[in-house]
Image (cartoon, rainbow, N blue to C red):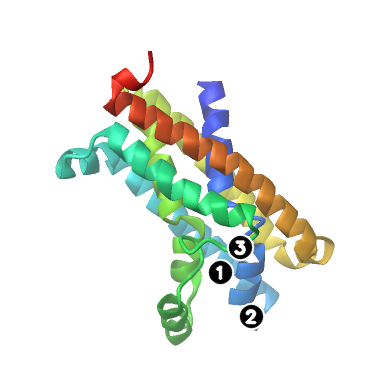
Amino acid sequence: MIIYTIHALVSVFAVMNPLGNLPIFMGLVDGQSLSEQRKTARKAIGIAFLILMIFLVLGQVIFSLFGITVDAFRVAGGILIFGIAYNLLHAKPSHVHAPNSAESEDSADKDDISVTPLATPLIAGPGTIATVMALAAGPNIIENSVAVFIGFSIVLIGTFIIFYYAGSISKHLGQTELNVISRLMGLLLAVIAVQMAVEGLTGLFPGLVH
């Protein structure tokens, strides 16, 4: 279980990529005071935690409701995550994580960015949700779910710390350093995505692997 917890932690950290999302966070909270920035970060992390918990707990219910097999979800999740990895390898923001124009305008109108686009899709976006659900599924669902819960909780705590001290971190990490980190996360994420897709394909078509 310890090994699977580490696997879940690394997978969620790679797909969430809090350091790579730091410039986006800084841009979204631009104009806020330091206390407001930290309050926004705290609220966003709390909401992201609730989102991931909902999909972690209701994952099997969603699969059953829509007649989705775990293996099919792993293939789809692997493809989605590989798309995120591709963008990270090219040091480009992922369209899955980056807020679109409608979300940005909506957050500007509401004057509260903690729910959208921060909590979702930036922190708990489709890629992160797919990773959590795919990792929790399987025959050992209880043990897997506990491992995934511990994994994404640690990542969320780390993300909160990064956003909490965003100003100080930004002074020490330039765009070049952040691009290097994004590319490393992209490489790791690509491997995870391929492995996830292969596991799904193996389950769907057992004859592929002898």
Quarter of the image where one finds residue 208: top left
| On-image quarter of the C terminus | top left
- At 56% from the left and 22% from the top, the residue drawn is 3
Mark 1: secondary structure: helix
Amino acid at circle 3:
Lys
Instruction: Give the residue pinned by disc 3.
Output: 92
Instruction: Give the residue pinned by disc 2.
Output: 32
Mark 2: secondary structure: loop
Mark 1 burial class by Cα count in 10 Å: few <14, some 14-19, many 20+: many
CA–CA distance in space, label 3 to label 2: 26 Å
2 and 1 marks in contact (CB < 8 Å): yes
CA–CA distance in space, label 1 to label 3: 25 Å
Does 99 sit left or right of 65 as displayed? right
Q: Of 200 and 2, which appears nearest the observer?
A: 200
1 and 3 marks in contact (CB < 8 Å): no
- At 39% from the left and 53% from the top, the residue drawn is 51
Residue 52 shows which numbered tag?
none
Q: Is residue 128 visible?
A: no
Instruction: Give the residue pinned by disc 1.
Output: 40
Amino acid at circle 1:
Thr
Task: Decide which of tag 3 and tag 2 comes sooner along the chain.
Answer: 2
Mark 2 burial class by Cα count in 10 Å: few <14, some 14-19, many 20+: few
Q: Position of residue 65 (x, y in %)?
A: 16, 43
**In this picture, is 50 found above or below 200?**
below
- At 40% from the left and 24% from the top, the residue drawn is 143
